[in-house]
Image (spheres, grey):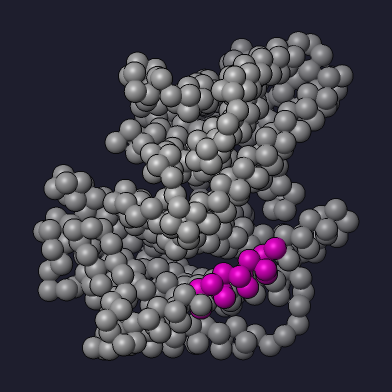
Amino acid sequence: MDAVHSGFGAFLIGLTVLCLPVYIRILYIFVKVPKYRKLQCYRIMAQQGVTHCLMAPYFLFLGVDHFLGYDLCRIGQTSLKLMGACLRSEAIFGFVLALDRLKLICDLTYPKYIHTLLCLFSWCFGATYFSLLMTPNADFTLNITTYSSYFDSTRPYSAYIQQAGYCLVLSCCCLTFLVYSTLVVFLLYRRYKQKLNATYFKEKWIFLQALVRFAFDLSLTILYNFGSSIFGPSVELRIATTICYILNYLFLPPLLYIMMISCYNSSTPLWHMDAVHYTFGASLLILTAVCLPVYMRVIYIFVAVPKYRRLQCYHIMTQQAITHCLMAPYFVFVGIGHFIGDDFYGVGQTSLKLMAACLRSEAIFGFVLALDRLKLICDLRYPNLLHTSLCIFSWCFGIAYFSVLMTPKADFTLNINTYSSYFDNSKPYSSYIQQIGYCTVLVCYSLTFIIYSTLVAYLLHRRYKQMLNANYFKEKWIFLQALVRFAFDLILTIFYNFGSSILGHSTALKIATSICYILNYLFLPPLLYVVIIR
């Protein structure tokens, strides 16, 4: 346990020291450079960034406390209260930024001082929230040993402050979700009518980063508030939640801002195009070289160790993992292609077809794994042969899909120079293959979503009734990783299919999509599997 505390503390300190200077530099640019400072959206983002940076002391002192084994002079607890206040203010700034996007993209007319007043309210609420937590009548307690934090219900105002903060975040999240849903529907409609105005094209990257930030904020809020209700309290869940917090507030925003600044300054790009190709190729090769051996080791454990080999869920996860590893040649050959500026002997294009087939098979395996979770947790009775038959169908479908793409009648083309891939509609079967693959993934994801929604509702109901069975506690981590994997698969699929429709075609979007693919299929799964094995 001491090693876990020390490793966790080192990770928090290292990531904070790495990310904070970059974030502060970006905020300095927003404040100092006139073309950013004069726009209200950047002023809102700068204030939101300040709330993120004010969370850094919590992560830093928490890391130090995990090394020491106790909260030195209660500094960690004080910084925890500051972070709690910043989280509430940050939610308001997120809503104001969404309003700003709605106003600009939809050409709404109302006074700008409404945004200014909301920003002032955000700071006042955060300052009041922190001040009340510092009084003797309320407390927000940090427990280093159990990796937990909680409101001290013995203090008279603690419950009121907790509820006020919870209601504020919930209201802001709901309103922000409503605004972004309206924006997405509006943009899809205008795109369909080919009537997107000039303001949209100018502001699309600010809208994208705001939408991505909100999606991650919402996911993290749900994990923090309902994670223990679904999966039960555990040290692993608390560690994972804390890591998600530091990644969401100190790593993701500066990364998105760097991309946004790069795209905003399209007339003066940050790098020469050759350097972009080299950097992108190197990233693909390095990530594949690091992740693939770890993933193969995990698969070997699932196959070689009897306690894993005898369980059907691990059979399914092993087969799904093999489809992920079969995507690795694509990332390797595309990385090499970006170094040499050409798809050498068409190897990258062939590996692209293999990856496309693996993506379809992977979606079917994801559905089978969801069925397996439903059967075990809900104590359903039906033959395991059904799962085996679906797995066989998945392999057959993938092989057939790849085989047809290798014929002269269909083609899936790779273009290294434009970072793009597309079905060649001049071949007679290409459109049919594309539609079959699309429908397969859509059906599998829809069914998987229904299963996981049913499971979450069932578990919340059983948790409320205190009637969770033994299977749940035994299988909860497998269920958690399967649910997380499906969520990321779904987000990535939506991003791939509709990203260009909403945001327009751009090199930065294609690069970001490729990086997300390699992280989703070669980095995230082995990370989650290592957590399960431990």
**59 vs 239, nearest the viewer:** 239
Image spot of residue 514 (x, y percent): 56, 37
Residue at left offset 68%, top offset 30%: 421
Quarter of the image with the C terminus is top left
Residue 470 relative to residue 117: left or right: left
Q: Residue at x 81, y 55 (%)?
A: 191
Where is 197 relative to 470, above or below? below
Which residue is found at the position 27% from the left and 55% from the top? 12
Taking 337 as reference, is 13 above or below it?
below
Count of marks placed on residues: 0
Judge from the rendering whether residue 84 lies leftward or rightward of residue 38; answer left or right.
left
Find residue 24 and report its horizontal and vertical position in percent.
37, 66
Which of the pair 45/161 is nearer the observer?
Answer: 161
Q: Is residue 21 visible?
A: no
> Along the line of sight, which residue is nearer the eye, 119 or 63?
63
Percent from the top left, x then y, of residue 530?
34, 34
Instruction: Specify the quadrant of the image occupied by residue 385.
Output: top right
Is residue 336 shown above or below 41? Answer: above
**Which picture quadrant has residue 395?**
top right
Determine the main secondary structure of the stretch shown in magenta. Answer: helix
Residue 304, image quadrant: top left
Q: Is residue 91 in view from this perspective?
A: yes
Please tell me which residue is depicted at 47% across the width and 75% down the height of the picture.
166
Horizontal and vertical percent position of residue 468 = 44, 49
Region in magenta: 168-181
Q: Is residue 242 magenta?
A: no
Up-down relation of residue 176 to residue 218 (above or below): below
